[in-house]
Image: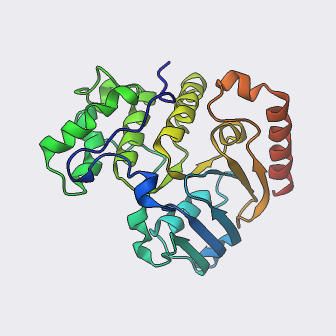
Amino acid sequence: MHTTSSKAPVAEPRSRVGPTATRESDGEAGAVAISGLSHRFGTLEVIDRIDLSIRPAEVVGLVGPSGCGKSTLLEVVAGLREPTGGSVSVDGDSDPSRLGSCAYMPQRDLLLPWLSAVDNAAIALRNRGIGRTEAREVTAPLLDRFGLKGFERARPFELSGGMRQRVAFLRTVLAGKPVLLLDEPFGGLDAITRGEMQEWLAGALPVERRTVLLVTHDVEEALYLCDRVAILSSRPARIVAELAAPSPRARPRTDAVTSLDFTAARERALAALLGGR
């Protein structure tokens, strides 16, 4: 299976249009601070006084029951919604312009069916004002690193579910934002493909060095991919527990999820989920 963990980040060509601004130039870019956050839709309270701080380049998972408010929380962090109580800041910016620091990957890949894989991924660069030719020049070499070599000209209907998700993730990375917000990125995949994609992403995240907030209902996925996992209660969502990852993300997935430490962490997370219902 393709992996990226041994490759260095790609140098950015003309006008800094590559996928990643280096940590040296960004300094501490990507810090997220959530304080007393609440949100409601009319009389329906979906988030209840959440406090969470995320360090630059840290990968944090949010796990909770379906419908508890996880996706709403991502939308508030991104600046797509404003909280009804408390605050969210990205690098100290708490107004809606924090959307400029966040790249949001929704549950569906939302690939445009009439565009090729390379052009779907390059949309992120086109949105940054880069011309089509240069956007393709930047994007095409990255397809190999993202496990898509040979599928540059393939349309979405010609790609497997896992390949479509890789294109969507590359598009998210190419947005050039210090914070990636991933909402159930593998939720629609079968178990085998999902496991393969988890292992691939575990190798890709250390290379990209972004701050990541990952929403999933899969405890095992969160513990494998993230540095830290916050367990949410049923709606209205509250943080009922936080767990540190039991092993490095770069380990082979089979070894990681069958270790005694991982099994113990999974049991603690499941107990917290049950307690928060």
Q: Is residue 189 left or right of residue 219?
A: left
Residue at 52%, 68% (x, y): give it.
76
Image spot of residue 168 (x, y percent): 39, 41
Q: Confirm whether residue 136 shows in the render.
A: yes
Q: How far from the left and from the top, in percent, is residue 13?
A: 24, 44
Q: Nearer the viewer, residue 111 or 259?
A: 259
Question: Viewer-proximal residue, 226 or 78?
Answer: 226
Relative to 114, residue 144 above or below: above
| Residue occupying the far bottom of the picture | 85
Q: How many marks?
A: 0
| Residue positioned 32% across, 41% down in the render | 11
Can the viewer see residue 114 in this picture?
no
Q: Residue at (67%, 65%) from the top-left corner?
A: 52
Q: Nearer the viewer, residue 241 or 38?
A: 241
**Quarter placement of the C terminus:** bottom right
Left or right, 188 with respect to 167, comes to right
